[in-house]
Image (cartoon, grey):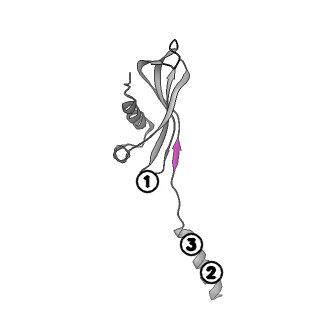
Amino acid sequence: MKKILFSFMLLATLKATSQTIDTTVKSCIAAKINTVVYKHDIPSVSDTLTHLGVFNYSDDLKGNCTANWVLIANGKNILFDYYKLTDAQYTSWDGSAAGLLRFIASYLSVTFK
């Protein structure tokens, strides 16, 4: 009986100390920006960029956040990439997608309407 209780306690202790990873994944927010004309590689093609969007972001709740952003023109995704918050940005970030938009807009040098 003691062995069974000991095994149960040992198993419970191992389960209680196992590592968990806290992660949140959020998605989709966009805001109107002051229009920017984007010249494509083909000189005769250009688009008027009208929106900056974050289509998802992942926060590990431990100091790392990466956001996927997109610049939109005429309902089409024109430019997209990802942005990783710096340590200072993560510390000052309020945890919202709108906060991410502000950091990304600053990085891209675009302003909101």
Q: Which residue is mark 2?
A: 7
Distance (Cα) linking label 3 and label 2: 11 Å
Q: Of all residues shown, which one is farthest toward the bottom?
A: 2
Q: Say which label, 1 or 3, has the lower sequence index.
A: 3
Magenta region: 20-28
Question: Residue 20: image x %, image y %?
Answer: 53, 60
User: As shown in the figure, which amino acid type bears the numbered disc 3?
Assistant: Leu
Question: Residue 7: image x %, image y %?
Answer: 62, 80
Q: Residues within 10 Å of mark 1 (few under 14, many from 20)?
A: few
Horizontal side of 53 relative to 9 (left or right) equals: left
User: As shown in the figure, which amino acid type bears the numbered disc 1?
Assistant: Lys
* Secondary structure of residue under mark 1: loop
Instruction: Single out the mark in the foreground, 2 or 1.
Output: 1
| Rendered view: 43 above or below 66 | above
Q: Look at the image and say whether residue 24 sits in the magenta stretch.
A: yes
Q: Residue at x 47, y 43 (%)?
A: 66
Mark 3 touches mark 2? (CB < 8 Å): no
User: As shown in the figure, which amino acid type bears the numbered disc 2?
Assistant: Ser
Q: Residue at x 45, y 45 (%)?
A: 65
What is the number of the mark on residue 37?
none
Q: Which residue is mark 1?
A: 62
Q: Look at the image and say whether residue 4 sits in the magenta stretch.
A: no
Q: Of all residues shown, which one is farthest toward the top?
A: 44
Mark 1 touches mark 3? (CB < 8 Å): no
Q: Say which label, 3 or 2, has the lower sequence index.
A: 2
Mark 2 touches mark 1? (CB < 8 Å): no
Horizontal side of 75 relative to 98 (left or right) equals: right
Q: Which residue is mark 3?
A: 14
Question: Residue 93: image x %, image y %?
Answer: 37, 43
Distance (Cα) linking label 1 and label 3: 23 Å
Of residues 28 and 50, the one drawn nearer to the viewer in this rendering: 50
Distance (Cα) linking label 2 and label 1: 33 Å
